[in-house]
């Protein structure tokens, strides 16, 4: 993950509420209401890959709030009912963000938190999480699976991020941004940095213009420091040809032929890094529940360190650190965050020849002292032996007589 700003950065006061609408103004309503989509009971390949039922014993996302900064969320969908907070509408000034005129935000929210239903194959990775819809965009790129091409304006986008991260407003633990700007905005960068400083995990799409003839432009906010950038793979684990690539890609997730919730009810399918991103946001919510004391950088480290190997190797611009693995992110024990200190290197400044000569002299000295000690010991032994012989001759080699004693 890109390095975030220092945690002690001074917060910038930002006006986060739009001007109040006139009392007589009516709330904006989508001009067209969708029909009823068919409910799919087939288990999506992405659910087969991640197996949400295996994750549930460890975490469901309960108590974690995930802000979906997008086109709003249709809270009436059967698999999202009761799981969507009021949120905020920065696009039309509505009281909340529980309305979606294009369906993109609803699809993203379903990947995160769709509740399991017996008749539905789709199941969110973090069905216990609360979705906070923050509505900023209805600009649709119809060639890329209805992926928003950008927010209404960078200023409103920055306001939306600040609102989502504010504990008194959105109170988000995780922010999902399945939209891309191609122009760098200092206001958005600063808002992202404030969110990270407040302890919010920020996840963003890497973009869908990675084909050779599309220029692969730098995507924002994925390229900003502190953001987990997400690219898209297909069912075979291969990067989608549209998925943008660069140093801003941190991890990959399914983004081709993904099953998503349709507006109002039922399901449809879509593709794009927009739909890969919520898999990572949902995993961040699970990690947040299981390890509540982790910082955003530590959550990102756990997600990236437990990613499965990808064709690009340990780290590449095409696949980042690999393919998302929520189960490993929840269960593995990581090593220390910093490697152990390297043992100091002993540097010998002496001339090797001089050192060798000194060693030989030391060994010769030690040998001389040993020989001298042996010689001295031999001399002492000879003297003692000679004295014993002389003494024996004087007695005629008779044994000594004990001293006579008298009784008292």
Image: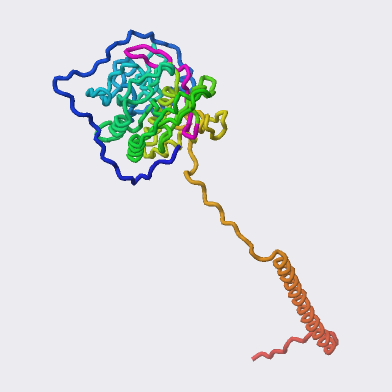
Q: Position of residue 141 (x, y in %)?
A: 40, 19
Closer to us: 17 or 57: 17
- Please name the residue shown 47% across and 27% down the image: 231
Percent position (x, y) of residue 263? 33, 14
In-image side of 370 versus 97 (left or right):
right
Total count of labels: 0
Residue 15 percent coordinates (x, y): 24, 35
At a point 52% along the width and 51% down the height, the residue shown is: 341
Is residue 330 in view? no
Q: Is residue 254 magenta?
A: yes
* Image quadrant in which the N terminus is located: top left
- Which colour scheme appears in the figure? rainbow
Q: Is residue 312 left or right of residue 2?
A: right
Q: Position of residue 388 (x, y in %)?
A: 80, 84
Instruction: Determine whether 261 is above or below 156 in the image.
Output: above
State the image quarter where residue 297 is shown: top left
Query: Left of 168 or right of it: where is 374?
Result: right
Quarter location, residue 404: bottom right
Q: Which residues are magenta?
A: 246-269
Residue 118 part of the magenta segment: no
């Amino acid at each position: 993950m890109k390095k975030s700003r220092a945690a002690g950065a001074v917060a910038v006061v930002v006006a986060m509420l739009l001007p109040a609408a006139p009392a007589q103004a009516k709330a904006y309503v989508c001009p067209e209401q969708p029909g009823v989509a068919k409910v799919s009971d087939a288990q999506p390949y992405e659910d087969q890959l991640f197996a949400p039922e295996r994750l549930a014993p460890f975490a469901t996302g309960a108590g974690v709030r995930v802000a979906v900064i997008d086109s709003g969320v249709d809270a009436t969908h059967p698999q999202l009912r009761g799981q969507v907070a009021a949120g905020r509408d920065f696009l039309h000034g509505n009281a909340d963000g529980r309305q979606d005129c294009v369906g993109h935000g609803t699809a993203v929210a379903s990947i995160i938190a769709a509740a399991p239903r017996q008749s539905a194959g789709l199941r969110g990775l973090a069905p216990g999480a609360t979705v906070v819809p923050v509505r900023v965009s209805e600009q649709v790129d119809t060639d890329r699976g209805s992926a928003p091409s950008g927010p209404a304006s960078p200023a409103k986008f920055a306001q939306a991020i600040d609102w989502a991260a504010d504990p008194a407003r959105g109170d988000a633990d995780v922010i999902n941004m399945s939209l891309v700007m191609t122009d760098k905005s200092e206001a958005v960068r600063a808002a992202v940095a404030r969110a990270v400083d407040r302890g919010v995990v920020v996840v963003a799409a890497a973009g869908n213009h990675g084909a050779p003839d599309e220029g692969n432009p730098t995507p924002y906010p994925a390229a900003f420091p502190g953001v987990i950038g997400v690219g898209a793979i297909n069912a075979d684990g291969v990067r989608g040809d549209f998925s943008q690539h660069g140093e801003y890609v941190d991890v990959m997730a399914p983004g081709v032929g993904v099953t998503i919730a349709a507006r109002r009810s039922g399901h449809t399918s879509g593709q794009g890094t927009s739909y890969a991103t919520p898999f990572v946001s949902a995993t961040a919510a699970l990690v947040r529940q299981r390890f509540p004391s982790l910082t955003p950088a530590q959550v990102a480290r756990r997600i990236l360190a437990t990613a499965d190997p990808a064709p690009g190797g340990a780290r590449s611009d095409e696949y980042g650190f690999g393919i998302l693995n929520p189960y490993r992110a929840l269960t593995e024990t990581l090593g220390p965050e910093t490697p152990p200190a390297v043992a100091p290197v002993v540097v010998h400044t002496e001339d090797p020849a001089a050192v060798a000569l000194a060693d030989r002299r030391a060994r010769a000295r030690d040998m001389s002292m040993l020989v001298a000690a042996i010689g001295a010991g031999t001399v002492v032994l000879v003297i003692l032996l000679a004295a014993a012989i002389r003494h024996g001759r004087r007695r005629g080699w008779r044994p000594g007589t004990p001293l006579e004693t008298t009784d008292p």
